[in-house]
Amino acid sequence: MATAASRPTPAHELSGTAPAISAPRNDDVNFQGLPIPRGPVTAHLSFYKAPEDGSKPHNWVEPQQGRPQRNFGESWHDVVLDDLRGQEHKFSLDNNAFETIQNVPSEEYEFKDDEQIKRVYYPEVEKLLLETVPGANRVLLFDHTIRRSHPGAAREPVVRVHIDQTPSSAAQRVRFHLPEEADQLLQGRYRIINVWRPLNGPVMAHPLAVADSATVQDEDLIPVEHRYPDRTGETAGVRYNPSQKWYYFSGMKNEDRLLLKCFDSDETVGQWGRVPHSAFVHPRTPEGAIGRESIEVRALVFG
């Protein structure tokens, strides 16, 4: 775990740039000896398409046989994704709703036991957020998801552009997890931030694409009911708009972190308070590359 003396430095606080994408480097191949796809790429992304019957869009968290998981469709578009490598310092949570952090150590290696993840990895994530998110003074980690891109995996990468929370579901999260303090906490600044990292990096198959939130229009975000067995939350579908600017962080390693801000109650940065994201198929993924494994931890960040 990082100590206060070895505070991880968010990329936007760094000066200068990394070597050019085309420059030779030792990490341009993975442990299999396969070339890691880097640089700008045009990829096929799945955007929101409204239900044909005009009904309210919804998605079931636990699909059942004979019932479609969702009632809305997909609209596929070719999108240019720029590579964040070499320009990480240009982006921050407040300005773009995503941020990269590198060289973050961890004492958790297996990621097979949920209780061990909560005992070992959760405190590391909480510390990282308190150290690197401006103004943060309290963090509540409320869940995590492990995704593995191989047949039979419990959760696979989501190949659909979306945002995990909407303003109403973010407030609902505060009330759900901290009911006795909710009225007071909702009067101050609160954010929902996902901390995303690979488990078997460098990532070659199904990397994560993110949109610069400052280029995303509110009218292109569609609330979608997220139906659990015992309650209903809300996520956002995202309509395609050519004005959106998209990126990915090539060859993410286990020591890399990608912070994704799904909501921010601060109206001065409200326009940039949500980041559309999606896994995607990189057309230059070499044959034989191992499937991506990753974990995302979701946090309520106060202050």
Image (spheres, rainbow, N blue to C red):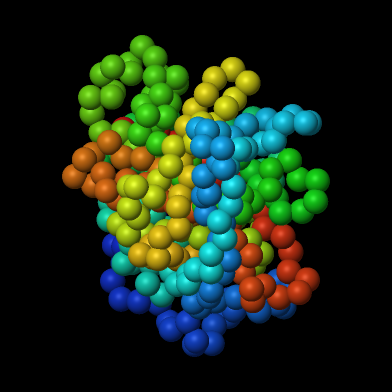
- Measuring 74% from the left and 64% from the top, which residue is drawn there? 290
Say if 284 sits above or below 106 in the image.
below
Q: Is residue 26 visible?
A: yes
Could you tell me residue 209's position as x and y percent? 51, 60
The image quadrant of residue 59 is top right
Above-or-below relation of 97 to 266: below
Of residue 103 and residue 285, the one placed in the foreground of this image is 285
Which residue occupies the foreground of this view, 199 or 52? 52
Say which residue appears at 57% left-offset and 42% top-offset.
Answer: 52
Identity of the residue drawn at 21% across and 40% down? 267
Instruction: Please provide percent x and percent y for residue 3.
Output: 41, 47
* Place of residue 112 in the rendered image (x, y in percent of width and height, measured from the top left): 71, 40
The residue depicted at 37 percent of the width and 72 percent of the height is: 87
- Which residue is nearer to you in this view: 24 or 127? 24
Q: Position of residue 12 (x, y in %)?
A: 31, 62
Quadrant where the C terminus lies?
A: top left
Residue 255 seen by the camera: no
Residue extending farthest to the top is 180
Q: Count numbered badges in the picture.
A: 0
